[in-house]
Amino acid sequence: MQSSNNIAEVVSHFECAADVGSQKAYGSGHINDTFLLKNVSAGGPDYLLQRINHKIFTNVEKLTDNMRRVTEHLKSKIREYGTGDPLKEVMTLIPTDTNKFFYQDSLGDYWRMFYFLSDTKSYDVVETPKQAYEGGKAFGKFQHMLADIPAGQVFEVIPDFHNIQKRLKNLDEAIDQDACGRVASVAAELEIVRKYAEEMQYFQQPEQVATLPKRVIHNDTKFNNVLLNANDEAQCVIDLETVMDGYVAYDFGDAIRTIINTTTEDEADLSKIQLNMPLFDAYVKGYLKEASKFLTDSEVNSLIKGALLLPYMQAVRFLTDHINGDTYFKIKFEGHNLQRARAQFQLVKMLDANATAMHQTILNEIDSYKTAQY
């Protein structure tokens, strides 16, 4: 737990009424540290305080500019539509006493603060088709509302974040260095990497680069990055630090990765990893309800490629971190990253075996929305 003295220093520089003594760790993120703080006044808004991992997000000022621009754009869209509440449906950054939206403390750590959205919940494992549908609708609406921001207008906070060629290169470098002597024990996993490597470079093929538009997307659409209300209806998309240019299929793929799996991302018993197809169908229906308003035909055809790529890429990243000695992702026990990688590779195998049928589901659904528009 972060020391209360340090938290007190940090909180004193934000325009808030947070009770420092109420701090408690919040959420299940792999990268940043998040704390929930209560308001000193009964009935006042509570707060989320985040320590930004500036070893990963090295340009905190540009990162913050991205988040401000995106949240302001989303709020303006909701006001334009006249059908929602911007304060409940979009995260709100809280300024500091110098009118910035981040603070660097005396230890050199960077922090930001949001209003806490009360009476919401998130799920690490999707339980019902309704939840999947609402998640799809949330991410589809998120992409739709940002579709009029031209590519190249937001800062690339992590260059080549979803470039599988870079991830494979990083893996090769980790293998060559073998810093912890772990390469010999992951031969089976490396064979899976090699088996799928060529087909996973779909988005780097010249034809796709020429035809697929780059858009401002979320880039980290784990299902627990959607907050649902008490009725399991989508309310807000959160964790906006990776919002930057990319292909819509990346967002689709990462959402499917965390929705369709019948168990957790780090399941040790691979036999438990199955595909929940009703959840896939529901997510596709919700996503295309919103995304069909702007998607091109080439983007529609790329969605299933994203569903295959993202668990593969995540497995490669987990495996790389395991070989490097667990320097990037938080782990709960030795071998955690390897366990995560194995689970994601198993998910890739299951998705690959069902890809044709899943692609047809996408095509059937997009046809139904196109027909309804005419």
Image (tube, rainbow, N blue to C red):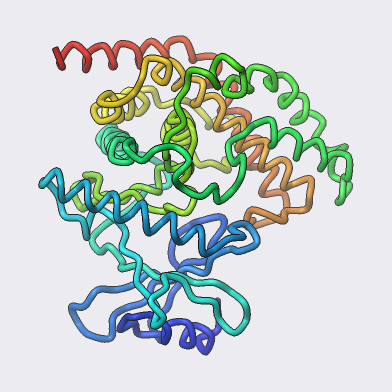
Count every numbered label the image shows and give the total. 0
* Quadrant assignment for the C terminus: top left
Q: Residue reaching furthest left?
A: 82
Image coords of residue 87 (percent x, y): 22, 60
Which percent across, then down, holds residue 85? 16, 55
**Residue plotted at (67% across, 54% down):** 328
- How far from the left and from the top, in percent, is residue 181? 89, 47
The quarter of the displayed image where residue 368 is located: top left
Say above or below: 295 vs 105.
above
Q: Can residue 222 be seen in this view?
A: no
Q: Nearer the viewer, residue 155 or 96?
A: 155
Q: Which residue is drawn at 39% across and 18% down?
A: 300
- The residue under the point 60% across, 17% down is 206
Residue 124 appearing in the image: yes
**Residue 178 or 103: which is nearer the viewer?**
103
Which picture quadrant has residue 372? Answer: top left
Left or right of 231 on screen, residue 179? right
